[in-house]
Image (tube, coloured by chain):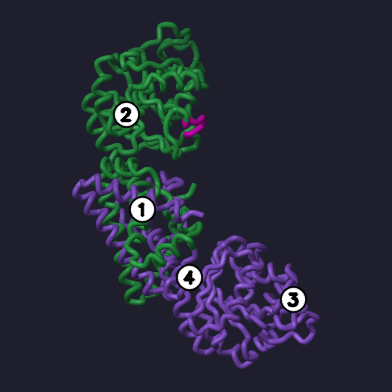
Chain colours: A purple, B green
Amino acid sequence: MASQPASPFPQTAADAPSAVASPPLPTVGIVGLGLIGGSLGLDLCRQGYRVLGVSRRLETCQRAVARGAVTAASQALASLAVADVIVLCTPLDALLPTVQQLLPHLSPETVLTDVGSVKQPVVATIAPLWPWFVGGHPMAGTTEQGIDAALENLFLHRPYVLTPTAQTPVTAVAQVERLARALGAAIYHCDPAEHDQAVAWISHLPVMVSTGLFQAWLREPSPTVRRLAQQLASSGFCDTSRVGGGNPELGTLMARYNREPLLASLRAYRQGLDQIIDAIEAEDWAAIAEVLHQGHQARPAFLE
Amino acid sequence: MASQPASPFPQTAADAPSAVASPPLPTVGIVGLGLIGGSLGLDLCRQGYRVLGVSRRLETCQRAVARGAVTAASQALASLAVADVIVLCTPLDALLPTVQQLLPHLSPETVLTDVGSVKQPVVATIAPLWPWFVGGHPMAGTTEQGIDAALENLFLHRPYVLTPTAQTPVTAVAQVERLARALGAAIYHCDPAEHDQAVAWISHLPVMVSTGLFQAWLREPSPTVRRLAQQLASSGFCDTSRVGGGNPELGTLMARYNREPLLASLRAYRQGLDQIIDAIEAEDWAAIAEVLHQGHQARPAFLE
C-alpha cells in the first residue's frame, strides 16, 4: 500500500499505540464512472474515503463530482498515481487496454481490482501484468446505465466475489475485502474458473434459456396462434422471459467472455431437455413428475 | 335455458315490456369448490346470482356456504337439476367421470362449461355427449388451492377463453359469456386446438424450459460449483426458475393433457437452442446479438 504522508494515523500495526486504532482509509481510484463505479463511489465517499474518479468523458466527471460519487475526477489515468486501491469499472472489452495505459502511472504495490462478471480470462490476462491484481465481482445492478443511475447501497447484502490466486499477495486481498465490507456486501472467495461456471449456471444460461422462448415462438407457423399467445401471456411467461428480453449487448458480451463455461451449461441443459422431450413422447408421466419434483425440491436453496 | 318459475322478470325477449329489461339471472351450478370454483362463486353470489355448489367433501360444502361462495351446497350432483348453467371446476382428470354422472340429472338445454387449461381433448370428449357444452378457460390463479384460497375479483381483467365449435348453440355461448362478463374478464373466442397451442407457448413450454435449469445444474460435476451457484443466485435466476419450481402434479397434468402441442413447442424450442449453441461454438457473436435482439424486441407485445 502506498503511504499517505498527510495522515495523522499510524501507518502500520507496529506503530499502533493500541489495538483499537484502525488503519488509515486508503485512497481509492475508480476507472469508469457508470452504474457500478458511481454506486461504489457514492458509498465510499459517504464513509469518508478519498475517491478519485476517471472517465473518458468530461461531462461524466462533472456529474460524478456533483452527485458526490467521487472526491475529485479527471479524464487522465495519471491522476490515479496517488491511489492505494484502484477499482476498474469499465466494460469487459475495455479492461485490458485500460490496464495497459494505467500501469506506467502506478506506485509498486498499488492494489488493482475489477468488477467484471467473468473472472478466469480477466485474471489470466491481468495478473501476469500486475501481481497486485485481485479479481472481483460485486453482483448487483439495475437495468439502468450511467452515472445518473448510480445508487447508494447498491451492494448492501449482495454477493461480492473475490478470486485471488495462490500468487495474489494476502495484503492485496485484504485491501479489496475492506472495500467490500464498507459496502455491506457478503464476501465470497473462489477460484476464477469456479466463479465463471457458477455464474454460467445462474446468470448466463438463464439468459439463453429465456430468450429461447422467443426463438421458439417465432417458429409457430400460425399467425392466429402467435397473436393469441401474446394476448394470453401472463405472469408465468413474463417472469420466465424477463432476462431473455434484456439488454442484447450485455448478453452477447457474457456469451463471448464466458464462452466455455456457458457452452458446458448449455450442453448439460440440452441433455436435460432431451430427456424431458423423450419422456413426454413416451408418455412416461412418472419421469416428468420426477423432473418437476426435483425442480420443486431444488429451488428453495437458490433463494436467499 | 330452464325457466325460473319464481322470477318476477319476463322470461324471453318477446315478453319484455321494454328494451331496457335484462333477462333474469340464471341459476348457476358449480362442481368443484376449490380456488377456481370458489372464486367464481364469490363474484357471482355478490352480484345476486343463485349459485348451487357441489363438492365431494361435506366440509368443503360447509366452508363454501360460510364464505358466501355459494347460495347452497350439496355433495349430490342431482342438486344441480335446477341449474341453467353449470361450470365444471374439477381437475382435468375428473372432468369426464363427473360429466357422465351429471348428465342424467340435467334438463335439456342446460348449458355446461368447464375451466380446464386444455381445450381440444375436453371439447372432443364432452361436446359429443352434451351439445350444450362450451369449452372455457378463465386464465387466473394463485399458488394456493382449496376453498379457503378463493378470492374475489380473481378473474377481473384476466383472459377468459371460450372455444365453441361450429355446432355449439349460440345461446349456450351467450350464457357463458354473460358469466365471464359478470366476472369482469376479457373474453376471447378461438378454436380449441389454437387455444391449446397458444397456452403451450406461454404456459406449458415455460414450465418445462424453467425446470430444465435445475435438470442441467444437477449435471454439474463439482459440488463446490453447485453450492456456489446456489449462493450467488439472484433475481434473474429466481424469475427464470419460478414456474419450473412450481406444483409438480399440475405440471405433469399439463404435459399429459396437452401432449402434442407441448411437444411441438418443445421441438421448436430445441431447434432454437441448437442454433444458439452452434453460434456460440462458432463464435458468431453477430448471430447471438441478433437472437437476443429479437427477444428484446418481441417481449413487450407479450406484456399487457
The amino acid at mark 3 is: Thr
Residue A168 placement, left or right of A224? right
Q: Where is residue A232 in the image (x, y as percent from the top left)?
A: 41, 44
Main SS of the magenta part reads loop
Circles 4 and 3 on the same chain: yes
Q: Mark 4 lies on which chain?
A: A
Q: Quote the CA–CA distance across marks 3 and 1.
A: 48 Å
Residue B184 belongs to the span the image colors magenta: no
Q: Given this view, does label 4 or label 2 mark the residue nearer the observer?
A: 4
Circles 4 and 1 on the same chain: no
Q: Given this view, does label 1 or label 2 mark the residue nearer the observer?
A: 1
Q: Residue at x 27, y 24 (%)?
A: B99
- Name the residue tied to disc 3: A71
- Name the residue tied to disc 2: B134
- Name the residue tied to disc 1: B211
Crowding near pointer 4: few (<14 within 10 Å), some, many (20+)?
some
The amino acid at mark 1 is: Thr
| Between A118 and B123, the one nearer to me in the picture | A118
Q: Quote the CA–CA distance across marks 1 and 2.
A: 33 Å
Which contiguous range is marked in magenta?
B149-155
